[in-house]
Amino acid sequence: MLRKERLRLILKEINLHNKVLSGDLSEKLSVSEDTIRRDLHELAEDGVILKVHGGALSKTFNYPFDGDNKVYALKAKQVIAEKTIRLFKNNMSVLVEGGTTIMEIAKMIPPNLRATFFTVSPQVALTLAEHENIEVISIGGKLAKNANVHTGASVINELAGIRVDLSIIGANGLSMKEGLTDSDWEIVQVIKAMLRSAKRTAVVSISEKLSTVQKIKICDFGIINYLITELPPGNVALSSYKGSQLVKL
């Protein structure tokens, strides 16, 4: 594989999954970890990623308020946001995670919606707070800097004490066979707690993440109520995603 093509694929993986490990990239691209480390150093020097111990982070994911950092697949995420807000009703209680897709949803909430939003993301909380009729409850804990969400036992304990109408979760890995997956153990535990706290759950994901799998399983696909992508519900890419209670938007 040519170096230019390898750098392009590395950047795509980082933007798609927000965080990547050097070892995983080495295995995926069939090159040494030393080669990957040099590639990540070059991309970091160019200012397009953030290099961290053991891997790299998406720059837009960690600095969504910086207008100089373009959000990956922004138009697709805005379509997802437009679909998601159709689920919101007055007097609902909603629990949301973090990430760039959730941020777009928070920005698009109609000004006349009256609802209570819980979130584990300080950035999402600040965006939700801009809506006059939204009550915002931030669930605090240890900040996971690679995802900008709160994690840890205190978060899980707080989540155990609430019951919301709807939870909205961003997908890192998503497949019909393996279910919902992620690469971060602490974030997985928070998402599991979110699932337990909600009457219904919506998973939001750009279509590029469909049929991708991360190392740690969160749940089977059968417990998800809504799958929301930028694709039309009848698109062939969604044909394998099915279930007795699943609604594709």
Image (cartoon, helix red, strand yellow):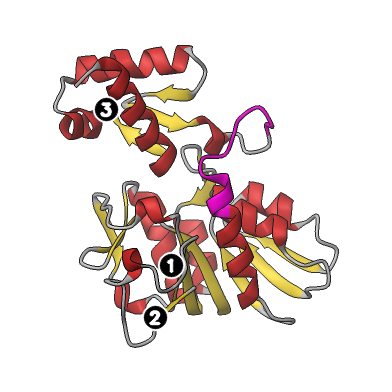
At 67% from the left and 58% from the top, the residue drawn is 106
N-terminal of the pair, mark 3 or mark 2, is 3
Amino acid at circle 2: Leu
Between 68 and 182, the one nearer to me in the picture: 68
Q: Rate crowding at label 3 as few (under 14), some (14 to 19) or many (20 or more) other CA atoms within 10 Å.
A: many
Q: Which residues are magenta?
A: 66-77
Q: Is residue 140 visible?
A: no
Label 2 secondary element: loop
Report which quarter residue 216 is drawn in: bottom left
Q: Is residue 154 magenta?
A: no
At 60% from the left and 61% from the top, the residue drawn is 81
Mark linked to residue 22: 3
Mark linked to residue 193: 1
Report which quarter residue 248 is drawn in: bottom left
Q: Give the CA distance from mark 1 to mark 3.
A: 29 Å
Amino acid at circle 3: Ser
